[in-house]
Image (cartoon, grey):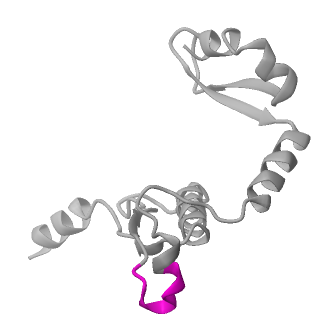
Amino acid sequence: MASAIVTNIPEEAMSSTIEKVELSKIGKGPDDKSGFFLNIFLKEQYVHDRIKHINEQETIKLEGSQSTDEEAKGEDAKKPKVLVDFSSPNIAKNMHVGHLRSTIQGDSICRIFEFLGYEVLRTNHVGDWGTQFGMLIQEL
């Protein structure tokens, strides 16, 4: 499937937006039985242009955002809320650097929403207590 995606990327995207595309094999064994990471590298100039475009916008409006009349009220205006649940490491397994990935991604999403004017509620729960409770019950 990853190979099919790479071969069907439009030529205009490859010339204007995408620097390169790499497939990184996951696991061992034959290619038809293994998965692949699809790594897409954007052109530096494209990223700069998009950020510049965003910065030039007077305001960024999303569905659910408040009107300018409500913004004029200042602190009295209610911001739209968004809940972001992230990280959730499986504590039944050893911690490793991979657990940082979802934490960093979740925090980045929160910061984007805050920039856009949302009130962000962060929640970070720890997953899979089954092993710990099983061991506790066995001990009791």
Which residue is situated farthest in the right direction here? 45
Left or right: residue 137 compared with residue 36: left
Foreground of the two, 51 or 130: 51
Write down the quadrant of residue 126 in the picture. bottom left
Which residue is situated farthest in the bottom direction here? 75
**Where does the image place residue 3, in percent across and percent down from the top left?**
64, 12
Q: Residue at x 46, y 65 (%)?
A: 65
Residue 75 falls inside the magenta stretch: yes
Which range of residues does the magenta coloring cover?
71-78
**Where does the image place residue 48, in percent across and percent down from the top left?**
86, 49
**Where does the image place residue 49, in percent across and percent down from the top left?**
85, 46
Q: Relative to residue 88, is residue 49 depicted above or below? A: above
Q: Residue at x 17, y 73 (%)?
A: 136
Left or right: residue 29 compared with residue 24: left
Q: What quarter of the picture does the C terminus occupy?
A: bottom left
Q: Residue at x 54, y 65 (%)?
A: 113
**Where does the image place residue 105, in percent across and percent down from the top left?**
58, 58
Q: Main secondary structure of the magenta part?
A: helix
Residue 132 falls inside the magenta stretch: no
Q: Residue at x 86, y 36 (%)?
A: 43
Write down the quadrant of residue 56 in the picture. bottom right
